[in-house]
Image (cartoon, grey):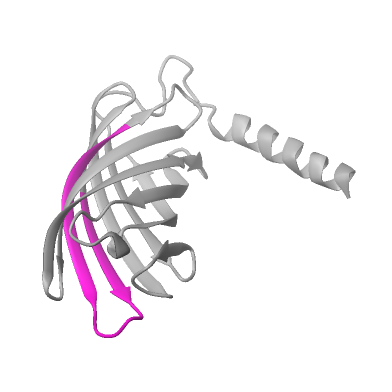
Amino acid sequence: MKKILMAAICLMMVMSVNAQKVLNESTTPFEESKFYVGASFSGLNLSYSKASDWSFGLSAKAGYLFRDNWMALGVFDYQNYSSGTVTSTNIGAGARYYFERNGVYLGLTAKYAHATGVDEFKPEINVGYAFFLGHYVTLEPELYYEQSFKESKYSQFGLRLGLGVYF
């Protein structure tokens, strides 16, 4: 079992090294003046919050790389919680920093959340990986933590899975 697991890890490392290779070595995938659009989903037991047992979320993102490895980002989220009729829509802005050419990024987002009976500011921190499927399209798994200041039970952490396009 250990040999199979190590072989799988080595295969994933080789794939990720090849996936980040750029056709023209003088440019990076995260160079200045590129645009980004992406969509992701969360929930489906991929996130945890004390407010509910189950939630489903959709997220749309648009960004612009204003410097190499630095992206300004706009976000729109929709969340539906199992605890009744609670839904939340969030709009926000943030930034991402890509660590060189490997695709790992760290992001910070400030969101305004409008939910049934609760309007609040929610900061979020996330870390993810932009795995290039082609020259422009990425698969982006992302771990996130969203802090609620009004009620701590609405704070949540989880995993988002998404697709992004860099052009």
Q: Which residues are magenta?
A: 75-96
The residue under the point 45% across, 45% down is 138
Q: Quadrant of residue 51?
A: bottom left
Magenta region includes residue 88:
yes
Please tell me how many numbered marks the rendered image carries: 0
| Rendered location of residue 115, percent (x, y) | 16, 70
- Is residue 39 shown above or below 63? below
Q: With 91 as the anchor, is 102 left or right in this view?
A: right
In which quadrant of the rendered image does the C terminus lie? top left
Of residues 4 and 148, the one nearer the viewer is: 148
- Majority secondary structure of magenta residues: strand
Q: Quadrant of residue 154?
A: bottom left
| Rendered location of residue 30, percent (x, y) | 36, 28
- Is residue 128 shown above or below 21? below
| Rendered location of residue 23, percent (x, y) | 50, 25
The residue under the point 42% across, 75% down is 54
| Rendered location of residue 45, percent (x, y) | 49, 69
Magenta region includes residue 123:
no
The residue under the point 37% across, 58% down is 40
Of residues 92 and 64, the one nearer the viewer is: 92
Q: With 109 as the anchor, is 142 left or right in this view?
A: right
Name, please, the residue furthest toward the top: 26
Of residues 32 and 44, the one nearer the viewer is: 44
Q: Quadrant of residue 137?
A: top left
Q: With 19 as the anchor, is 80 left or right in this view?
A: left
